[in-house]
Amino acid sequence: MKTKKRAKPRTHQLTPLQKAPSGIQGLDEITGGGLPRGRTTIVCGGPGCGKTMLGIEFLVRGALQFDEPGVLMAFEETPEDIARNVASLGFDIEDLAARKMLFLDYVAVESSELQEAGEYDLEGLFLRLQSAIQAVGAKRVMFDTLEALFSGFSNPGILRPEFRRLFRWLKDQGLTAVVTAESGEGTLTRHGLEEYVSDCVVLLDHRIHDHISVRRMRIVKYRGTKHGADEYPFLIDERGMSVLPVTALQLQHEVSDERVSTGVPDLDELLEGKGYYRGSTVLFSGTAGSGKTTLAASFAEATCQRGERCLYIDFEESPKQVARNMRSVGIDLAQWSRKGLLFHDAWRPTQYGIEMHLLRIHKLIEQVKPKAVILDPITNLINASTEKEVYSMLLRLIDTMKSAGITAVFVSLTRGGESLENANAGISSLTDTWILLRDVELDGERNRVLCVLKSRGMEHSNQLREFQLTSEGVRLIPAYIGSGGVLTGSSRVAQEAKEKADALLRRQEAQRRQRQFARKRIALEAQVEVLQAELAEIEQEARQSSVQEKERDDELLFDRQRMAESRGSREKAADE
Amino acid sequence: MRLKAKGKAKVVKDSGKLIELRLYVAGQTPKSLAAISNLKKICADDAKTRYHIEVIDLVKNPALARDHQIVAIPTLVRRLPVPIRKIIGDLSDTERVVVGLQIVQPKR
């Protein structure tokens, strides 16, 4: 600038780097507040990767949300073309221009018509820029793309100092600028713009992976700030750009002691009578047709009955189909959709890459703010990706949901034949409660059995229950567990009947034996009586005999005495 | 504000070819002044052609830079005869200017 405006004197206190918020979902989180204020950021990448989109969104949101008017210096597309491109995002550029929030300047740089004859500089550009900034009081500027100047002017010896002058000037004016640039082979930008602008460099990438387009963003450099250095997936949809945020992967979230009903009273019974912990993660796994969706729908209904919003994401069936099927078990999902408590969305897993799924789910969560989220089924996602990626995606999703206190339900389909525990090994370790639905085949019947394999933090029953779908919902009946294993269905009924019969038989047998004993006792008692009578007789005889003995002894004695007496008396007579 | 170059608008004897030029400058910077003086000299040297020179100071009227799509300073635009030709620089390279403006008449 040739005017004599002095740069503002720099203060000597150390102030932290100011940031200009972009308003782009997720980007402000990764950068810790936005792009560096008063500095220039380079956004580079291949063609079609979204550089222009990012810059424009930065300008438009700056004007709309943060009251910072902006200037767009367009070198490649005319403002009309740009306006048309972003109209689909709901950005009305012409309206903003009319309201003096945005100034658009199309800079035509044609190389063929220009002859160079002597020294020149780019003062014309500076003058235009300054008049544009003054026209709206701009705080933000976007150049799309400055590299066009390289093709217009063939003398790099003149261009490079002018670039330096431009960025210094922007800094002195305290303007936050975004410059788009095309990536070079092995270099960040084709013409090496990053030499002049090194405060912040953002690299965008657009790849095709397995037929699915994947967009990624990386903060290559951000001076003076701790920033996320990974590649973050992002998408561009009808609301603009969204970057997958990096919230707490730190396991520091708050936990709740509150319990929420599962929607099935018999199942609540198995979980201390109270249900799941709020904010926990629940996994229903089982083979096809085992009733997992019904359990999920029961939980959705219970959530809505509490007046809380539920987000149900279906990767397999359409919402209408699920609603119809659930009516047959007495669950009316349609009424909750009507009341605005149930948000039932469905899309095919093969429609996007895994990161896109995560982003889309994320956006829905932000929009709907549910207290419960159901993914049915998650195993379908593996069709679109690998198990490892799905695991990583679920991990991040769980983290986000736990931080927000959202109860998550995952439905997992396992193939019959493989051990159900094995099939879910990785994912089950992420969940707090794991409910397994298993088929039991016996005697020509297949019945379902439910078991709570694990439930962290609570006492849960380890008993199997027979799982029945009735017109009033899910019922759990204690299954018969005996020597023959688990019996369900008719076998159970048959076994119960058999047991009853057995019990009856035993009772009868016992009664018979009692009668037998009674009879024997009577007989024995009769015998005892007889023997006692004999005994009495013998005693009698014995007494009698002893009495007789005594009498005889007495008589003998008497006789002897008499004889003695009579002998004595004769002797006496003889003596006389 | 338009400044008309003084003099050198004489009609000359030959073909009566008129060349209309517009020179965009930015204030009184060295390059701008050099361009003005170089241009006058070139035009003076070519006595056979009529030149009509208009000097536009973009510092005084920045909106014109946008309207006329000027990026480099100085820029010389030959508006007539068509097609339009643009030359950038302080015009110190006389040959280039001449070639660019195509004012050298083919010698018989």
Image (cartoon, coloured by chain):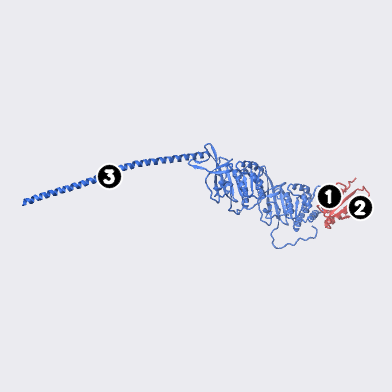
Chain colours: A blue, B red
Percent of width and height locating residue A359: 66, 48
User: Disc 2 marks which amino acid?
Assistant: Ala
Where residue B86 is drawn, which disc sits there? Answer: 1
Percent of width and height locating residue A175: 75, 56
Considering every residue shown, the one lying at the far left of the view is A576
| A104 sits left or right of A499 in the view | right
- Number of callouts in the render? 3
Which residue position is annotated with label 2? B9
Which residue position is annotated with label 3? A536
Gap in angstroms between the C-alphas marked 3 and 2: 177 Å
Where residue A82 is drawn, which disc sits there? Answer: none
Percent of width and height locating residue B101: 86, 49
Q: Residues within 10 Å of mark 1 (few under 14, many from 20)?
A: many
User: Disc 3 marks which amino acid?
Assistant: Ala
Percent of width and height locating residue A31: 68, 54
Gap in angstroms between the C-alphas marked 1 and 3: 158 Å
Q: Is residue B65 visible?
A: yes
Q: Residues within 10 Å of mark 3 (few under 14, many from 20)?
A: few
| A525 sits left or right of A29 in the view | left
Task: Give yes or no for contact between labels 1 and 2 (Cβ–Cβ under 8 Å).
Answer: no
Disc number lying in front (1 or 3): 3
Vertical position of residue A537 compared to residue A139: above or below: above
